[in-house]
Each structure stands twice: as C-alpha cells, then as structure tokens.
Image (cartoon, grey):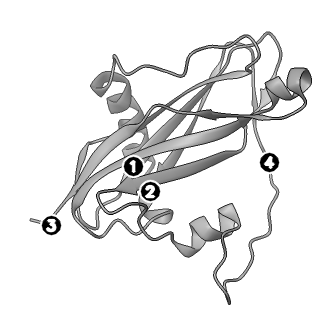
Amino acid sequence: MRTTFVLTAVLALFAVQGQTQVENNPKRLFSISFYVVPNKISVGKPVNASLFVQNITDREHNFPEEQIYVQGDAGEPPMTLRHRQLTGHLNPGDPALMMGGYSPPIEPGETSVRYYNLLDHYDLSKPGKYTAYVEIIDIGERRITGKANKVRSPLATFEIVPAS
C-alpha cells in the first residue's frame, strides 16, 4: 500500500509537469497542487490522489484543513459515510466522528504531501469522466481581512472505466 502511494507521488510529478499551481498571493500561507494518477482507473480499483501543500512563508505553519470535492458527468457522486463524517453532512442515523488530532507542521519553503483514495470519500462505481479538487483553509488572510480564505487546487481529471 505504501509503495502505491509513493509511486503515485512520483508519477504525479512526472505525469502532470505543466499543470499549474494556485497562484501565489502575498496574503497566503500555502501554495497547493492536487493530482490523480493514473488518469484511467478500472471500476473498484483505488483512485489514488495526492495533495501537495507548500509553505510559502518564512515561518512554520501547521498543515491546513482540507476538503475534497469530486464531480462526474451526472454531478457530485454519492458521498461515503466517512466523507459525510469529515464534512459534517450527516444523514439521519449516521454516527458522528470525533474530530481533532495532529496536524503536522510545515517548515518554511517545505512541501508536505497527503495521499487519498477517493473511494474512501465518494461512490465511484459508475464508469465516466470525473474531476476532483481540494479546498484548503488558508488562515493567512485572516490576519489581514478577518476571515479565512479558501484556496482551491487546480482540477485533477480522471476516468473510471469498466473492469476488464
């Protein structure tokens, strides 16, 4: 499993070299990019995604809160229980999730990576074309404007194909 994620990160760096990152803004703390590799995945296989978050300041900051979004040909696919728990979009009878935990610090100029299997967040059992992105809460702007800024990653595209 770890090998798959490391391979995903390496492939992401080579497969999508030219994909743009979110434009740097002097108020922001982070620059982000998001990838799904490979871009054609058989139904039922892991949909591996990588979020790269770079600290673009001269101070250490904790990894920001993030939320994953996926859209398909028919709109947003059904969320899994795990995703509903993480986002607070619970259905009646869904158990709540205890929140909290450790958010690792990112040193100035350093990049931290988080890996996801999008199947943990959405029902991607229907073949079709999908886009995914991540929004992070970048608190850097809060110091200037009084409200946190959501920073959206570039879109990552992928296709779910019938199992062969």
Q: Which residue, given by chain and number where applicable, does mark 4 sit on?
A: 102
Q: Earlier in the sequence, mark 2 or mark 3?
A: 2
Quarter that holds the C terminus: bottom left
Q: Which residue, given by chain and number where applicable, does mark 2 sit on?
A: 118
Q: Amino acid at mark 2?
A: Leu
- Vertical arrangement, residue 141 with respect to residue 92, above or below: above
Q: Secondary structure at mark 4?
A: loop
Q: Amino acid at mark 4?
A: Tyr
Q: Which residue, given by chain and number where applicable, does mark 3 sit on?
A: 163
Nearer the camera: disc 2 or disc 4: 2
Along the line of sight, the residue nearer the viewer: 63 or 31: 31
Q: CA distance from mark 3 to mark 4?
A: 38 Å
How far from the left and from the top, in percent, is residue 28?
73, 20
- Vertical arrangement, residue 131 with respect to residue 9, above or below: below
Q: Which residue, given by chain and number where applicable, does mark 1 sit on?
A: 48
Q: Which residue shows up at 40% across the image and 54% down it?
A: 71
Q: Amino acid at mark 1?
A: Asn
Q: Earlier in the sequence, mark 1 or mark 2?
A: 1
How far from the left and from the top, in percent, is residue 35?
41, 36
Count residues near mark 2 (Cα–Cα under 10 Å), then give few for <14, some for 14-19, many for 20+. many
On the rendered structure, is 21 left or right of 84? Answer: left
